[in-house]
Image (spheres, grey):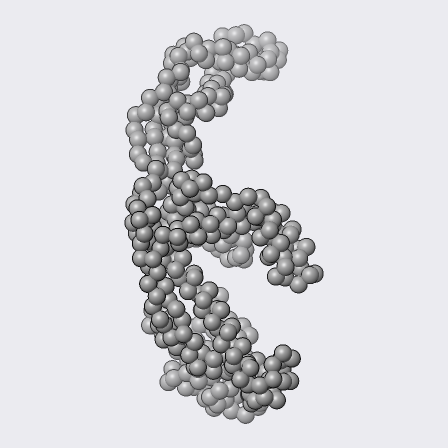
Amino acid sequence: MEVNVIETSAVSKTLKVEFDWAEIADIYAEIFKDMRKNFKLAGFRKGKVPEEIARHHLAPDVEYKCMEQVIKDNISNVIKQAGIANYLDFKILQLNFDEGKPFIYHLLVEFDPQIELPNYKKGFKLTRKKYIIDPESVDEVIARIQEENAIVTETDGPIAEGHFVLCDLQELDQTYLPIIGRKLTDKIIKVGEGIFGGEDTAGLIGASAGDKVTVRLPRQDGTKLPYQISIKRVHTHTLPEIDDAFVKATYKEMETVADLCQRITESLEHEYAHLSDKELEQAIIDYFLKNTDFELPGFRVNWYLDRLIEDYKKNRQDQEVDEEQLRAQYRPQAERTVRWYLIQKTIREQENIKVEESEVKQMIEQIQASYPEDKRAAVAEFYQDHSNRLDLVWDLLEQKVIAFIKKFVTEKVETVHTKEAKSRRE
């Protein structure tokens, strides 16, 4: 067997593989012998067809089985002889087989690239946001508490700002005819807020249950689409006053409004501290993506897209899925994810970062403990699935890689008020 590399890139090699006929003649003869035993032809008994006639009829099938067996039996040695330690995928590009002559085929082998990481161990600077909880953020939470404890009353009167409406929303085309399949049912909207405030939805004011109102609602790109709103029911919400009596009646462990505000502030501080950590982790990922350039193996990108599309189909079994459109739409995400995975893989290998089985079990126990007792068996069953367990392992590995990298990060703290952070997001 002779193996020659005829083309190479950072993520693949094309190999020319050649077997002398003497190396495969016995395999060919054995396959022909086995197939001839079961070969039938008019005028001859099964297995008694003369050799030359049988050879003429069976040649294509014998050649195919011989090529298949030779490739299968030798593929590992072929790839190893080409100097490829670990491969992702391979494809047969060309086959040239004639009885009595050398068997030649071309093989495309794909593998992960060798990655040159930035010199991150010398240290690099990133910004960490430290969030200051504003009174307005506390007030927003209190407003949500009021809404959650509101007294809901159905009204037959005309709609006014602040009313809640149970309705169906039917998207219309530019001629104001209904678009089939673009209807949202039993949605609750609050009149006068968000996209349901302003002159484009002014027709809701004064309408009543049973009415149909045409409005124009904005899209993310700034354009507006016509909708017909079919009003089913109208409710008013009477909000409770947040005073010490309300706090005592609602929260056993608190006595005053000041206690409630303190608890809300602490909860928000914890929430925004977690957000700060996640933003710093994302900044670390962005640093490596920006400063590490390498070719991506198509196999990994396509595998990611295949899995994403499979999950997409499972969640939308009643809808047609345009796979090509999805692939184009999610390719940037796939490439980013694969790029970061390969960077992590390189760091793990260089620093011998691993996750032990005991760590996986411990994490599953922690996850179980966060659920009610009657749900914990279902959590354990979920992680018995190999795919789900593997996802957890990848998450733990990523956490370890991030923790290792953080040792080399110099943090520049930027103070941000939560009111300002919210306005930025909006």
x, y percent for residue 231? 52, 82
Give the residue at x 63% y 59%: 369
The answer to which of 166 and 76 lies nearer the viewer is 76
Along the viewing direction, whichever of 329 and 382 lies nearer the viewer: 382
Closest to the observer: 420 or 265? 265
**Residue 424: x percent and y percent?**
35, 72
The structure residue drawn at horizontal position 48% and vertical position 90%, both measured from the top left corner, is 160
Q: Please provide percent x and percent y for residue 318.
A: 54, 57
The answer to whether residue 426 is visible is no
Residue 401 shown left or right of residue 157 in the figure: left
Seen at 49% across and 66% down, the residue is: 181
Looking at the picture, tell me which residue is in the foreground, 16 or 276.
Answer: 276
Left or right of 369? Residue 282 is: left
User: In what quadrant of the picture does the C terminus appear?
Assistant: bottom left
Q: Is residue 395 above or below residue 419?
A: above
Asked if residue 152 is positioned above or below residue 388 in the image, the reply reads below
**Residue at image location 37% in from the left, 66% down from the top:** 129
Say which quadrant the N terminus sits in. Answer: top left
Q: Is residue 94 above or below residue 364?
A: above
> Residue 355 location, x and y as percent?
52, 45
